[in-house]
């Protein structure tokens, strides 16, 4: 199995926090999507283009472990790594780190099936397989 990696930056917005200024847990999954989208963009192929070419990568599994709280106005890095797990599945691993002190805040993964426009499994596109395979 080979991997590739992207680093994305986000700043916690007020709307992403609760009354105590702590990030609401579901926002981490949104940030995972930011990382995943940025990683795919590194291939030169955006989600929009991928869908126009007849591919979809729906999430079939999601997991997140929370270690420390992110707070309003924290700058965060989402470290995203992609791994091919089968001809029709890809797994993305994520680490969310506060940039000010390097504290690991959360980590997790998502698994995605590669589907065609009718919802049937479709082999991962060569450009994705090549990118992930070439990045060991």
Image: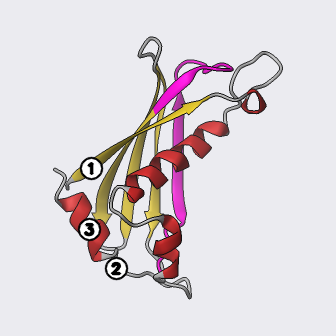
| 123 to 96, vertically: above or below | below
At x 24%, y 61%, the residue is 131
First in sequence: mark 1 vs mark 3: 1
Mark closer to the observer (2, 3):
3
At x 35%, y 63%, the residue is 44
Real-space Cα separation, disc 2 to disc 3, in angstroms: 9 Å
Q: Alpha-carbon neighbours of circle 1 within 10 Å: few (<14), some, or many (≥20)?
A: some
Mark closer to the observer (1, 2):
1
Residue 71 placement (x, y as % from top left): 65, 19
Helix, strand or loop at label 2? It is loop
Tell me if residue 95 is in the magenta stretch. no
At x 52%, y 62%, the residue is 60
**Front in this rendered view, residue 31 or 113:** 31
Q: Is residue 12 left or right of residue 57?
A: right
| 59 to 67, vertically: above or below | below
Q: Are marks 1 and 3 in contact (CB under 8 Å)?
A: no
Residue under pointer 2: 123
Real-space Cα separation, disc 1 to disc 3, in angstroms: 11 Å
Residue 21 placement (x, y as % from top left): 75, 18
Q: Alpha-carbon neighbours of circle 3 within 10 Å: few (<14), some, or many (≥20)?
A: some
């Amino acid at each position: 199995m080979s991997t590739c990696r992207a680093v994305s930056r986000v700043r916690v917005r007020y709307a992403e926090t609760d009354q105590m200024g702590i990030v609401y847990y579901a926002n981490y999954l949104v940030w995972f999507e930011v990382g995943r989208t940025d990683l795919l963009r590194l291939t030169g192929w955006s989600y929009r283009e991928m869908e126009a070419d007849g591919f979809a990568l729906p999430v079939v599994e999601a997991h997140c472990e929370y270690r420390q709280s992110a707070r309003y106005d924290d700058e965060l890095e989402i470290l995203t790594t992609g791994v091919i797990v089968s001809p029709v599945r890809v797994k993305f691993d994520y680490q969310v780190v506060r940039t000010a002190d390097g504290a690991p805040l959360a980590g997790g993964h998502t698994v995605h099936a590669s589907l065609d426009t009718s919802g049937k499994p479709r082999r991962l596109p060569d450009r994705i397989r090549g990118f992930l395979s070439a990045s060991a």
